Image: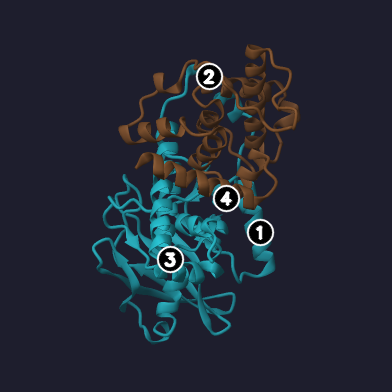
Amino acid sequence: MTEKLDENFIKSLVVIALGIVRGRSDPYELVNGAMEYLISNKERYMDHPNIKALAVLKMKGLFIDGIRKNQKMTSMTDDEGNDLQIVDEKQSDISDQISLNNECNKVLTTIKTMGEKCQEILMLASEGMSMQEMLEITEVKSLGTVLSRLSNCRKELKGLLA
Amino acid sequence: MIDETKIMQYADGTLPIEEHAEVKKAIEADPKLKELYNGFQETGDLLFKLGNEIKSQPLPKNLQDKADILKTWKKPIVKESNSLNFFGLFNIQPAGMAAAFAIFFAGGIYVDNFIPTKDKKNTNQVIALTQKVDDLNKKLFIKELKSKKIEKNIKLRSMPNMEEDLSTRVTNLYRYFNADQFIKDINSKLDALEINDEFVSSLEDNDGKKVKFILVENFNANGNNCKKVAFNEPLKLSSNDQGTDVSLDICKINNNYEITSINLSK
């Protein structure tokens, strides 16, 4: 799919970045880092068929790199290859920089209390991504996994908001 | 046993049309599934609003500068005219289909997206008795009309500018208008109608009032007998919509009427 590249593209990345940083770093910085990467590799990526997925994966990489540097970690997985739960001190939060209405603020605050997989997929859904796009970005094995993860996370969100 | 993910897809309007009946029946028969369905509708609305709220925030200057750089990368070729014509591509000749998809992909239009559930606060929005047709939604594309042409980029995502309002209107239309049900309701009536005749389907507005349609025109397209049918009053399809005139092109293909295009006025 061809993505129109403009400020709305970047705003979409901000929404997704919120699901990546999980309130532990500045999503704008993450988006900025990914944008700098894309722009400095213009010739390589300007005709990429799914530049948004590319940008999101870059943001995920940058986030993990940042955590690694802060925690001097050499791997993001445990001995059995499972993702480590990243525990990091809270840094600047987008909530300090933007003003959401009460309802949205409550939803975002609630999402930030959830597990990282839920945070990621809920923000991807919030951005308006299709299941196929979510599949590409979350790098899970199947569409069924994306569907069940989103379904479970939305049920959990509903319960937390109740 | 209905998979919960199918309930979610049904609530979002992304479940394939052929599975609607089974899921709808299950929801109606089981209060727990109904509750689950309502919950998915609620979270769908909330996530949609959250995404739009975040996107409505201005970008920091460093990102705005990068947006300006990105704009120079690609110039999507999508055209908008005074009236926008959204086609469901079913039963179109292969050449037309190929052309349609060419325009679809060149245009950078996202339609296969996460679709929110209805916002009950909006008035004058039409409500279908069943869910919208996501398959049709997936196959939408914008056609350049022969009349006055205005170069404009359109992106069916996110919110606030004019382009995004169009996206909202299209999404909302498909949230409430179930094309399959509509055709089922009116298939037997259409042949007997004359120009300017009013008729109703099972479609109701938020007040439970039947939505009226009017037969505007009979015409021929690709050898098929077609009819242009319009909603008899403008629809409010987004919070800042002053009223959108919506008409449908319905053609008789293999002895059954099918919607071949949905037209939204600017």
Q: Which chain is cyan?
A: B
Asked if disc 4 and disc 2 are in contact, CB closer than 8 Å, the reply is no
Instruction: Using the rendered image, report if marks 1 and 3 lie on a common chain.
Output: yes
Quadrant in which the N terminus of chain B appears: bottom right
Which is nearer the N-term, disc 1 or disc 3?
3
Quick one: which residue is furthest to the front in this view?
Answer: A79
Q: Residue type at mark 3?
A: Ile
Q: Residue type at mark 1?
A: Ala
Q: Residue type at mark 4?
A: Ser
Tell which tag, 1 or 4, sits nearer the viewer. 4
Which residue lies under the disc numbered 1?
A: B99
Give the x, y percent position of residue B202: 34, 73
Q: Nearer the viewer, residue B3 or B20?
A: B3
- Spatial distance from mark 1 to mark 3, Cα to Cα? 39 Å
Any mark on residue B27, and which?
A: 3
Q: Secondary structure at mark 4?
A: helix
Q: Chain of mark 4?
A: A
Q: Is residue B151 in sight in this rendering?
A: no
Residue at 64% x, 51% y: name it.
A143
A99 over B166 or under it: above or below: above
Q: Secondary structure at mark 3?
A: helix
Q: Nearer the viewer, residue B240 or A148?
A: A148
Any mark on residue A148, and which?
A: 4
Q: Pointer 1: residues within 10 angstroms few (<14), some, or many (20+)?
A: few
Instruction: Using the rendered image, report if marks 3 and 4 lie on a common chain.
Output: no
User: Which colour is chain A painted?
Assistant: brown
Which residue lies under the disc numbered 2?
A: A25
